[in-house]
Amino acid sequence: MSQPDWNRIAADPDFAALKRAKKRFLIPASLFFLAYYIALPVLVGFMPATMKQEVFGRVNWAYLFALSQFLMSWILAWLYIRAAAKWDKMEHALLAKLGHR
């Protein structure tokens, strides 16, 4: 297999579409993750009484929110895997079009 011509790949409109598709997912997902992650200390700092309220048993809102971060991370990972599979197909199609696969 020959080495890809990176300049030709970079100039191809399908490569630009691949980069746009990645940005469309990665930027919002990263911002959401950061906002969700930072929300817990912010809420505990600004709304301590609310975050101390027990939801069920001895579990309060702060613990519940902290545990929800695990779920949120798994969901984001699952969404990323789905999006990355589409990007892989786009990449394979681009390389096949340019004669590299």
Image (cartoon, helix red, strand yellow):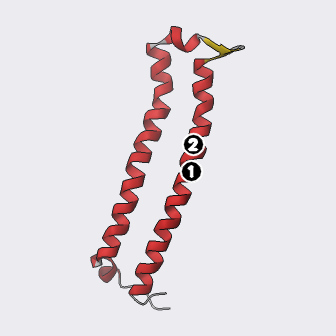
Image location of residue 65, percent across then percent down: 57, 26
- Element at badge 1? helix
Q: Which residue does the image show at 49% across and 23% down from the upper left?
A: 41
Front residue of this view, candidates 59 and 45: 59
Residue drawn 53% across and 47% down? Answer: 76
CB within 8 Å, label 2 to label 1: yes
Q: Which amino acid does label 2 sit on?
A: Ser
User: Residue 80 at what x, y percent from top left?
Assistant: 52, 55
According to the picture, the residue beneath numbered tag 1 turns out to be 77
Residue labelled with disc 2: 73
Q: How crowded is mark 2: few (under 14 residues within 10 Å), some or many (20 or more)?
A: some
Q: Which residue is situated farthest in the front direction here? A: 56
For numbered disc 2, what is the local secondary structure? helix
| Real-space Cα separation, disc 2 to disc 1, in angstroms | 6 Å
Badge 1 density bin: few <14, some 14–19, many ≥20, Cα 10 Å: few
Residue at (43, 34) in percent of width and height = 35
Amino acid type, callout 1: Ala
How many numbered marks, from 0 up?
Answer: 2
Percent of width and height locating residue 101: 49, 87
Vertical order, 51 against 2 (above or below): above
62 relative position to 6: left or right: right
